[in-house]
């Protein structure tokens, strides 16, 4: 048994301070002044501990995902060319220079043979694409990116500009 309390647990408890008013904390402190109530709380915490242990044993451990900028920064030490390629691609996706619609992102992911194409938000899609591409060797990433030129571009904006240009000339 550890003699020190897990720092993250204390931080999580501290987050509760924002959720409850001062009066609730004062009531809890007063409630804990009674020895029998402290014993009840200890029993409750022991039960929570055993439930936690069982849940953690059953649940697959998910590692925390690094934000994309950190992922790309870490990648630089392992494969600079791959990191630069993905950084440039990520920037162009975020700036809507490439694959400007959700459907074009989905088409690209399918053409590249990537897993996830079920996204609710564009930024989520971009991040998942970068994460999946980061797992591939550089050559496979380059091949996948070459396919972006085969993804049909949306021509609505271009068409509207041509129409405006033609109409302005005819006046």
Image: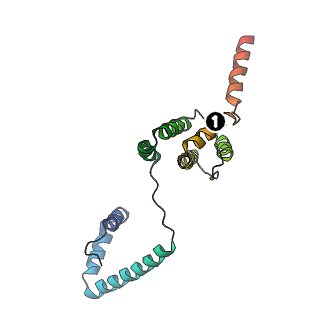
The picture quadrant where one finds residue 140 is: top right
Helix, strand or loop under label 1: helix
The picture quadrant where one finds residue 100 is: top right
Q: Residue furthest right?
A: 170
Work out whether residue 166 or residue 55 is closer to the camera in this orientation and state it: 55
Q: Which residue is mark 1?
A: 146
Quarter the N terminus occupies: bottom left
Work out whether residue 17 or residue 149 is closer to the camera in this orientation and state it: 149
Left or right of 158, for residue 66:
left
Quarter the C terminus occupies: top right
Find residue 103 and report its horizontal and vertical position in percent. Answer: 68, 43
Please tell me which residue is depicted at 43% across the width and 77% down the height of the picture. Answer: 53
Find residue 158 and report its horizontal and vertical position in percent. Answer: 68, 26
Work out whether residue 62 or residue 136 is closer to the camera in this orientation and state it: 136
Find residue 102 and report its horizontal and vertical position in percent. Answer: 64, 43
Q: Could you classify mark 1 by the number of other residues whose Cα lies within 10 Å: few (under 14), some (14-19), or many (20 or more)?
A: few
């Amino acid at each position: 048994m550890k003699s020190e309390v897990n720092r993250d647990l204390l931080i999580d408890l501290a987050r509760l301070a924002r959720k409850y008013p001062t009066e609730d904390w004062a009531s809890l402190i007063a409630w804990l002044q009674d020895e029998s109530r402290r014993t009840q709380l200890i029993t409750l915490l022991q039960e929570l501990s055993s439930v936690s242990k069982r849940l953690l044993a059953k649940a697959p451990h998910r590692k925390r995902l690094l934000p994309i900028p950190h992922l790309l920064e870490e990648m630089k030490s392992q494969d600079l060319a791959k990191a630069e390629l993905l950084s440039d691609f990520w920037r162009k996706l975020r700036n809507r220079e490439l694959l400007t619609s959700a459907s074009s992102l989905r088409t690209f992911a399918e053409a590249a043979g990537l897993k996830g194409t079920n996204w609710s938000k564009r930024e989520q899609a971009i991040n998942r694409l970068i994460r999946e591409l980061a797992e591939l060797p550089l050559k496979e990433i380059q091949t996948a990116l070459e396919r972006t030129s085969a993804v049909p571009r949306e021509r609505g904006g271009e068409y509207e500009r041509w129409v405006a240009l033609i109409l302005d000339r005819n006046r």
